[in-house]
Image: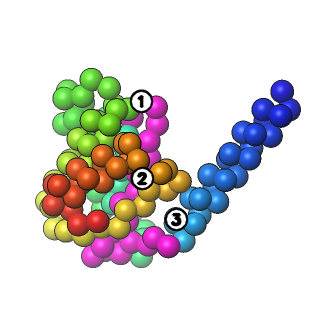
Amino acid sequence: MSTMRTVQKHLEVRRARRRQRVRRTVSGSAERPRLTVFRSHKHFYCQLIDDVGGTTLAAASTQDPALRGELKTGGSVGAAAKVGERIAAVAKEKGLAKAVLDRRHYKYHGRIRAFAEAARKGGLQL
């Protein structure tokens, strides 16, 4: 049992280092906010954050009422793509055309990739 805890702790440390490495290089402003993502097994969340002002400019997730009826599950690649389209539309409404993608410790693969491509397709420049 102790080896399982050690392995889990090692994975958490590696994930934290990867997150810090990405976060150190990515910073958002009011003109070009940071587009951060969080994925759970059931849902997908994103926010446009102004790091200078410390405010969230816009947010979207699979739990939004606008998306909830369209999706069967919130943890799929298709759901992440819908959230990408939604955040691009919200950003357009607020007059934001550019953003910096903060993928945290996640690989650019699967849901993260589908989200980013859908946001780009929606007109958000990443």
Residue 72, x across and y down, in percent: 27, 23
The tag earlier along the polypeptide, 1 or 3, is 3
Q: Amino acid at mark 2?
A: Tyr
- Indicate which label's residue lies in the foreground, 3 or 2: 2
Tell me if residue 41 comes above or below residue 52 in the rendering: above
Pointer 3 residue:
22
Q: Residue at x 57, y 66 (%)?
A: 21
Query: From mark 1 to mark 3, how far is it between C-alphas?
Result: 24 Å
Q: Is there a contact, CB below 8 Å, between mark 1 and mark 3? A: no
Q: Amino acid at mark 3?
A: Val
Tell me, for residue 108, which label it has, or none. Answer: 2
Q: Amino acid at mark 1?
A: Lys
Query: From mark 2 to mark 1, how far is it between C-alphas?
Result: 19 Å
Residue 94, x across and y down, in percent: 18, 63
Q: Is residue 112 visible to the viewer in this orientation of the structure? A: yes
Residue 109, x across and y down, in percent: 41, 47
The boundaries of the magenta stretch are: 25-43
Crowding near the residue tagged with mark 2, few <14, some 14–19, many ≥20 C-alpha atoms within 10 Å: few
